[in-house]
Each structure stands twice: as structure tokens, then as C-alpha cells.
Image (cartoon, helix red, strand yellow):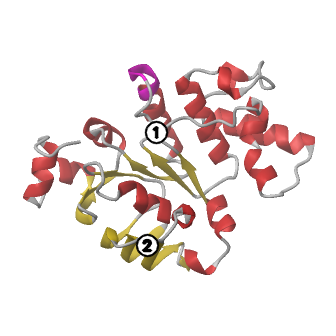
């Protein structure tokens, strides 16, 4: 079966603290994979390694291999990896001094990639359509992104990530700061986006994982405890620790 990412024996230390302890797993095209587990179990560190954002952390040491479409991500320029692997963070973070329009194409400008006015407009419209935001903002593209609601700001951040036409989209708790209506909107959007991009999502929300994911992984203490189809993991987990977590016997 074709894969997007293949992770083998990934180990991460920060100083003397071991964060990820030998995790191996593969991810597949046009699927949503949720990564669940208690706070501090290494979920966010794991996905930050997948587009090399971990390198911004002082004193971090990474061993093992990560391949994107069979290419070692540590053998190429990290900016090239980040064009292929977009990321959306826990809290909406549009660039506050930029307009909605400029937020969407910010990746091109930060990477020094020239765009004609016509091409920029095409990318902005397409990306905002993909993020389900075009109809709401098409008449206010040159207003600051900060005037949007929290849910709209998060969709703007998704549009910004999609503008670079990535193969993979990393979502780190993308709805944890949003109200229930905005959360539902983002979940519907995730289901639509997997037709064009593979999605790997960290979530504390067990219900969310069950609703939107094709595959689910359960992390605990920096280890991969269980990984499989969401239906299997949620109905007949192999490991009792997974069952305990799903029964909320572990803390969130």
C-alpha cells in the first residue's frame, strides 16, 4: 500500500529527557489519522518532527528515520519539506498586521517565491474555497485577518497552509480553542480536505477522533501503544491501556 510518511524507530530527547521512545508507523494518502494520548505523551513533538519544526527547539536530539514519499526528510532543505507538509497550530495565528489576502500567500513571500498579481489572486481564491471561507471573506480580502472570528481565523490558517499545495497537512489540536459550532465546521472541512491532502491530527478529543479519522494512534509516555483503523481501535482495542484511555480512566 502506498504511504506518505514512514517513521522508523524515531527517538527524541530534549536535554536528558526522553520524549519519543522508538516509534515506528506509516501514514497513507487521502486519509485522516488522529494521534491521541494524555498531555505530555509526545504527540505534538512527534508531528513537529514530520516537517522539521522540532529543529527550532534548543537542545533537541532526534534519532531514527522519517521518509516522505520514500525520501529521507533530513537529507533535504527543511523549507522544501515544509512546502510539502503544512501545519496548523492549536490556536488560530493569522499574521496580525497582514490582510486576509496577504495571510494566504504569506508562505510564498516568506520563501521568496515570486507571484504575479493574477496568480496570487488565483491561489487566494482557491485556498479560501478549499478552507470553506471564500464566501464569508471575498468582499473583505484586504481587511486584517484579526477581525475574523476564532473559527474563521483557524480556517484562514488552514487556507494559508493549503496555499502552498502540500501533500500532507499537520493539525495540532486545531479545534481546542474553538466553540462547538466552529469545531463542527472544521470537522466537516477535514472530511472534505482528505480528498486532496493527507491529514495527521493531534487531538485530545476522543469523540472528534472517532468522527473524522480513518486511522487512530494512541501514545502514552512517549511510546506508540496501539495504531490501526479507527473502527477497530475504538471497538476492540488490542491493548488494555487503550481501552482504559478510551474509557477516560487516564487523564486528558
- Is 58 in the magenta? no
Q: Is residue 3 visible?
A: no
Which of the two discs, 2 and 1, labels the residue nearer the N terminus? Answer: 2
Task: Name the residue rendered at 41%, 62% in the picture.
Answer: 46
Q: Which mark is residue 6?
A: 2
Magenta segment, prevailing SS (helix, strand or loop): helix
Rendered-image quadrant of the N terminus: bottom left
- 143 over 24 or under it: above or below: above
**Image position, residue 57 (x, y; %):** 52, 63
- Which residue ends up furthest to the left in the rendered image? 240
**Image position, residue 51 (x, y; %):** 55, 63
Residues 119 and 41: in front is: 41
Distance Cα–Cα, label 2 vs label 1: 23 Å
Task: Name the residue rendered at 7%, 57% in the picture.
Answer: 240
Residues 6 and 219: in front is: 219
Name which quarter of the figure residue 183 lies in: top left
Name which quarter of the figure residue 11 lies in: bottom left
Task: Name the residue rendered at 67%, 20% in the picture.
Answer: 147
- 89 over 216 or under it: above or below: above
In what element is the residue under mark 1? Answer: loop
Which region of the structure is painted magenta?
A: 179-183
Q: Specify whether 205 is left or right of 32.
A: left
Task: Name the residue rendered at 14%, 46% in the picture.
Answer: 250
Residue with the mark numbered 1 = 174
Q: Which mark is residue 88?
A: none
Amino acid at each position: 500500500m502506498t504511504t506518505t510518511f514512514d517513521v522508523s524507530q524515531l527517538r527524541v530527547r530534549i536535554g536528558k529527557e526522553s520524549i519519543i521512545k522508538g516509534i515506528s508507523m506509516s501514514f497513507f494518502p487521502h486519509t485522516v489519522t488522529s494521534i491521541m494520548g494524555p498531555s505530555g505523551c509526545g504527540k505534538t513533538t512527534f508531528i513537529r518532527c514530520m516537517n522539521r519544526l522540532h529543529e527550532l527547539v534548543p537542545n533537541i536530539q532526534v534519532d531514527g528515520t522519517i521518509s516522505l514519499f520514500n525520501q529521507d526528510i533530513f537529507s533535504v532543505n527543511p523549507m522544501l519539506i515544509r512546502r510539502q507538509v503544512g501545519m496548523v497550530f492549536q490556536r488560530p495565528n493569522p499574521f496580525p498586521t497582514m490582510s486576509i489576502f496577504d495571510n494566504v500567500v504569506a508562505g510564498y513571500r516568506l520563501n521568496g517565491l515570486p507571484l504575479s498579481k493574477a496568480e496570487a489572486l488565483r491561489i487566494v481564491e482557491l485556498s479560501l474555497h478549499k478552507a470553506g471561507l471564500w464566501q464569508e471573506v471575498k468582499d473583505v480580502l484586504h481587511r486584517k485577518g484579526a477581525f475574523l472570528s476564532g473559527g474563521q481565523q483557524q480556517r484562514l490558517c488552514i487556507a494559508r497552509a493549503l496555499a502552498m499545495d502540500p501533500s500532507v497537512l499537520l493539525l495540532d489540536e486545531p479545534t481546542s480553542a474553538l466553540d462547538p459550532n466552529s469545531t463542527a465546521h472544521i470537522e466537516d472541512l477535514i472530511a472534505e480536505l482528505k480528498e486532496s491532502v493527507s491529514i495527521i491530527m493531534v487531538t485530545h478529543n476522543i469523540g472528534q477522533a472517532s468522527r473524522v479519522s480513518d486511522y487512530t494512534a494512541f501514545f502514552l509516555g512517549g511510546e506508540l501503544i496501539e495504531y490501526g483503523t479507527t473502527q477497530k481501535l475504538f471497538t476492540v482495542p488490542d491493548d488494555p491501556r487503550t481501552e482504559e484511555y478510551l474509557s477516560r480512566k487516564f487523564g486528558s
